[in-house]
Image (tube, rainbow, N blue to C red):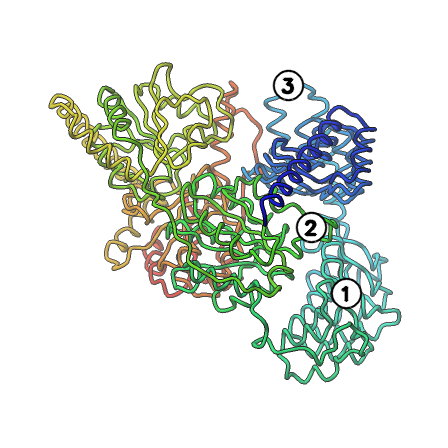
């Protein structure tokens, strides 16, 4: 590219940016004529201006301008774009803005009614309630909005209502109307389910009960209500065909069931359900029915029942369909004929191919031109595999590559078929990925299926960004140019990744620079400040020929430090302090600065507090470790730090709570210093850092320790020694008293279990890694296990997030024996991780702290009530925090994980003995008293 061409390209980019800004400015001013003129001139309605977080449609929706919203949609605006800050959609903005007509326009244009924001996990319905919009709430409920989603911080819709009713006295009548509408919808749903006795009989596989209901006049085609379940909008025939209830299928057909009924999740008919699950006899019965559409193409991928049968390897079902007259020449949305699917599933020598040959006009390229897989050209996908391997991301036992495949990424999966592990759902994949990355302190790799797959990983990406966890997410999309045509399944992955605070996002749109772009992502994933990196590649780029060379990128020296003069200034301030404190986070672990941190703390006898921390950065039983500053709001931290006269934050943001900090954390005049690779997070908050130092914590702390030792006076050293010894004596006494009291408690307790477990782990040649997500249910655990004093051997959640116990599965995949402590509140978040544990026979122990409730939510609620001057014992019973009657052993067995329920103290030793055998996964349902 010559200089003129380069300058022209820059000018064009600048012009586009300016035009998009003009469009958004016109929308803000409500200038319909200017908006219309700009759109007619070809301005992209979906363009994002880097200086403006919201695009034109989101802006108009938030302002409630129905006329401009309609105009933008007419010109191709995408109703599912996400803003660059919070990850909200235009529908979220419309619900906040308050114009019901705008909401209706967006829903009718295809806005995802249950889309959750990247940062909070709010749905549009939650925002409508939050902003007290009863008319919009009513519309969304009537349109089928889900009621059972959880926010990223664990709130349900009911939690939102209860919280707002308790803290916001304004417009209470509107809020009460919203609550009434939600309850009416719940009651309606409950009634629909209870009234559907035929559906219940079908789901239970009970032909006699089903026949009795049909004879009593039940609607043979009744639809299951939309409740965020696997049966949403299914007819009895769809369920029976899927679940293999042959006698019930015959019965339903006798009563006139619709053989072509379509469900709304995948857009499938009963014949899809039968062939997809290999129900040969049901396939034969359905295919012979009058009026059956043998060639119905599903909405999600364009597959016919014949495609589905071949895709899942059920050649007998496929033969039934071909004999019944199914078409052989229908192309699915991925451009594949049934015979292509057959070759993918069975190879090119299987007898089924003889009856699948389509006519010569089925597509432009005749089958005779097809070549074997091993004769193909080097594709972009193969180049990606080579680049990942040479960079050390795949190919070794300590590497992890995992994904939940969909149509579009098959090029990537096939090129790495020996390296990739399968996951059942993206939230589980994200947790597994994060755990593997944290244990190794190196990025693991995930493959996500387009926007849908990435949205399931967003929570993991967001949490990784908060604690500087290394990971690389490769998002396979159908087409790198899909945004120009707003194609099926297109959504703004890049915007979603940025909204989730990904460290770096790269979209590979040119097949000739694919590896160059990938190396950019690899380098960013390997250098600080660490965090999640997202790389987007279309199947058109992955399948295109590629001639680039794969090379191992060189990494810069990351052990950077400021001039010694800055360190000396910091040391002087710290030595003058009488009550210094250190706030620590996972940046210490990323830097491997454990020893240096401990030395600095001991030179000052400084209080050490965990801030944004999810692993051991400082020994928990060390005399100077004081505990955690809390994650909900800063009132806890402010109280704990009220006597501090100098603070040093290392590897953590200072302000990191869920609720916005309204006041500085420290008293006025207290000097605050910070050492971090990421100055952006360090300086976030009240901008009260007097000594911000960017650089490597390990090196800087080492330099600081050397300077402190040179500068410290004998008097200062004596004061530090006395303070340290007093803390040591007090901490030892406190621990002894706690242990004595805990072991005296009757029944099954976590302390007794941990005491027995530690006795076993002491004798093991390889101490297991421990992941603890039990939170309230794990009280007593850390008073016994030695892992809490060992970097790299103990991990917990940051900010109270749930579902991270799946990280233990990732750790076991690459690192050996691992134990996860799981609260029954968080157990169900990433259940699919159990399948990976079972499939790979991982050396994994799973301990469910079964206390029958969301203990953390109770604690947070009590703290919130006290903050607002309300006696917690006086509030209504939050029954929705309770989890009665769940059999965790049976759930584990369903995934192939054996287990044991412990209800009596006498069974504790047997449970521990079985847990530490590590000859495969084992689950303990620890029923706590």
Q: Which of marks 3 and 2 is nearer the N terminus?
A: 3
Residues under labels 3 and 2: Cα distance? 41 Å
In what element is the residue under mark 2? loop
Q: Name the residue under label 1.
A: 270
> Do the numbered discs 3 and 2 sit on residues whose CB atoms are within 8 Å?
no
Residue farthest to the left, as pictured: 714
Q: Looking at the image, how many numbered discs can be counted on the residues? A: 3
Q: How crowded is mark 3: few (under 14 residues within 10 Å), some or many (20 or more)?
A: few
Quarter residue 310 falls in: bottom right
On the picture, is 435 further left or further right than 149? left
Question: Which dot marks residue 557?
Answer: none
Q: Residue at x 41, y 25 (%)?
A: 636
Residues under labels 1 and 2: Cα distance? 27 Å
On the picture, is 849 further left or further right than 366? left
Q: Which of marks 1 and 2 is nearer the N terminus?
A: 1
Image position of 901 with respect to 779: above or below: below
Q: Which of marks 1 and 3 is nearer the N terminus?
A: 3
Q: Name the residue under label 2.
A: 490
Q: Is residue 172 visible?
A: yes
Q: Mark 3 points at which residue?
A: 169
Name the mark nearer the viewer: 3 or 2: 2
């Amino acid at each position: 590219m010559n200089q003129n061409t380069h300058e022209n390209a820059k000018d064009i980019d600048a012009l586009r940016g300016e035009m998009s800004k003009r469009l958004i400015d016109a929308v803000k001013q409500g200038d319909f004529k200017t908006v219309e003129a700009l759109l007619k001139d070809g301005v992209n309605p979906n363009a994002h201006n880097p200086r403006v977080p919201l695009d034109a449609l989101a802006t108009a929706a938030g302002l409630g301008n129905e006329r401009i919203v309609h105009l933008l949609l007419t010109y191709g605006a995408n109703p599912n774009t996400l803003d660059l800050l919070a990850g909200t959609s235009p529908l979220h903005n419309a619900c906040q803005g308050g114009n019901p007509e705008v909401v209706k326009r967006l829903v009718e244009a295809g806005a995802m009614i249950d889309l959750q924001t990247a940062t909070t996990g709010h749905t549009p319905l939650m925002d409508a309630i939050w902003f007290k919009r009863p008319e919009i709430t009513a519309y969304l409920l009537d349109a089928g909005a889900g009621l059972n989603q959880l926010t990223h911080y664990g709130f349900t819709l009911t939690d939102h209502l209860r919280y707002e009713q308790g803290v916001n006295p304004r417009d209470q009548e509107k809020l009460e109307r919203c609550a009434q509408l939600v309850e009416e919808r719940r009651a309606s749903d409950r009634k629909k389910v209870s009234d559907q006795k035929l559906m219940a009989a079908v789901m239970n596989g009970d032909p006699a009960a089903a026949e009795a209901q049909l004879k009593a006049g039940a609607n043979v085609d009744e639809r299951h209500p939309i409740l965020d379940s696997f049966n949403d909008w299914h007819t009895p025939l769809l369920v029976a065909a899927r679940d293999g209830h042959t006698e019930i299928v015959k019965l339903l057909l006798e009563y006139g069931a619709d053989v072509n009924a379509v469900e709304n999740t995948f857009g499938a008919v009963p014949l899809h359900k039968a062939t997809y699950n290999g129900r040969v006899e049901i396939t034969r019965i359905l295919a012979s029915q009058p009026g059956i559409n043998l060639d119905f193409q599903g909405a999600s991928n364009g597959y016919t029942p014949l495609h589905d049968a071949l895709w899942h390897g059920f050649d007998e079902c496929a033969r039934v369909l071909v004999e019944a007259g199914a078409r052989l020449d229908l192309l699915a949305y991925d451009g594949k004929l049934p015979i292509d699917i057959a070759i993918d599933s069975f190879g090119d020598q299987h007898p089924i191919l003889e009856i699948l040959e389509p006519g010569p006009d089925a597509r432009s390229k005749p089958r005779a031109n097809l070549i074997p897989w091993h004769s193909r050209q080097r594709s972009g996908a193969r180049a990606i595999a080579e680049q990942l391997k040479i960079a050390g991301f795949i190919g070794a036992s300590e590497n992890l590559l995992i994904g939940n495949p969909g149509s579009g990424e098959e090029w990537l999966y096939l090129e790495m078929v020996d390296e990739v592990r399968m996951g059942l759902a993206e939230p589980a994949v994200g947790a597994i990925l994060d755990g593997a990355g944290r244990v190794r302190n190196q990025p693991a790799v995930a493959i996500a299926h387009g926007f849908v797959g990435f949205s399931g990983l967003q929570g993991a990406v967001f949490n990784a960004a908060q604690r500087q966890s290394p990971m690389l997410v490769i998002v396979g999309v159908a087409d790198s140019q899909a945004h120009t045509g707003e194609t099926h399944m297109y959504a703004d992955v890049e915007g979603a990744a940025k909204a989730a605070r990904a460290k770096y996002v790269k979209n590979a749109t040119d097949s000739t620079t694919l590896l160059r772009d990938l190396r950019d992502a690899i380098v960013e994933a390997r250098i600080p400040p660490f965090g999640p990196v997202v790389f987007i590649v279309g199947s058109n780029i992955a399948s295109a020929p590629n001639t680039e060379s794969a090379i191992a990128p060189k990494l810069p020296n990351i052990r950077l430090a400021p001039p010694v003069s800055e360190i000396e200034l910091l040391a002087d301030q710290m030595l003058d302090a009488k009550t210094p404190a250190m706030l620590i986070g996972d940046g210490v672990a990323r830097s491997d600065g454990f020893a240096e941190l401990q030395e600095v703390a001991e030179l000052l006898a400084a209080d050490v507090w965990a801030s944004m921390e999810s692993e051991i950065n400082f020994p928990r039983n060390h005399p100077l470790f004081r505990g955690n500053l809390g994650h909900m709001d800063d009132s806890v931290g402010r109280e704990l730090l009220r006597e501090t006269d100098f603070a040093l934050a290392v590897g953590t943001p200072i302000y990191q709570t869920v609720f916005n900090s309204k006041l500085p954390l420290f008293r006025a005049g207290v000097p605050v210093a910070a050492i971090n690779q990421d100055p952006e997070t360090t300086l976030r908050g009240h901008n009260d850092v007097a000594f911000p130092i960017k650089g490597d914590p390990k090196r800087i702390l080492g330099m600081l320790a050397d300077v402190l030792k040179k500068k410290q006076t004998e008097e200062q050293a004596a004061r530090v020694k006395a303070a340290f010894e007093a803390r040591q004596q007090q901490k030892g006494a406190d621990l002894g008293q706690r242990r004595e009291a805990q072991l005296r408690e009757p029944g099954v307790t976590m302390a007794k279990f941990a005491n027995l477990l530690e006795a076993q782990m002491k004798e093991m040649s390889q101490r297991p890694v421990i992941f603890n997500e039990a939170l309230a249910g794990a009280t007593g655990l850390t008073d016994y296990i030695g892992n809490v004093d060992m970097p790299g051997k103990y991990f917990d959640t940051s900010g109270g997030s749930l579902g991270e116990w799946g990280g233990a599965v990732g750790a076991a995949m690459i690192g050996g024996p691992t134990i996860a402590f799981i609260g029954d509140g968080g157990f169900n978040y990433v259940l699919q991780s159990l399948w990976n544990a079972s499939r790979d026979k991982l050396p994994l122990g799973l301990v469910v702290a079964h206390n029958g409730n969301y203990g953390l939510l109770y604690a947070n609620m009590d703290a919130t009530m006290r903050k607002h001057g309300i006696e917690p014992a006086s509030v209504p019973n939050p029954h929705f925090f309770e989890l009665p009657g769940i059999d965790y052993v049976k759930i584990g067995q369903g995934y192939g994980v054996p287990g044991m329920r412990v209800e009596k103290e006498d069974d504790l030793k047997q449970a521990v003995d079985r847990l530490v055998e590590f000859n495969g996964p084992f689950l303990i349902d620890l029923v706590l008293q």
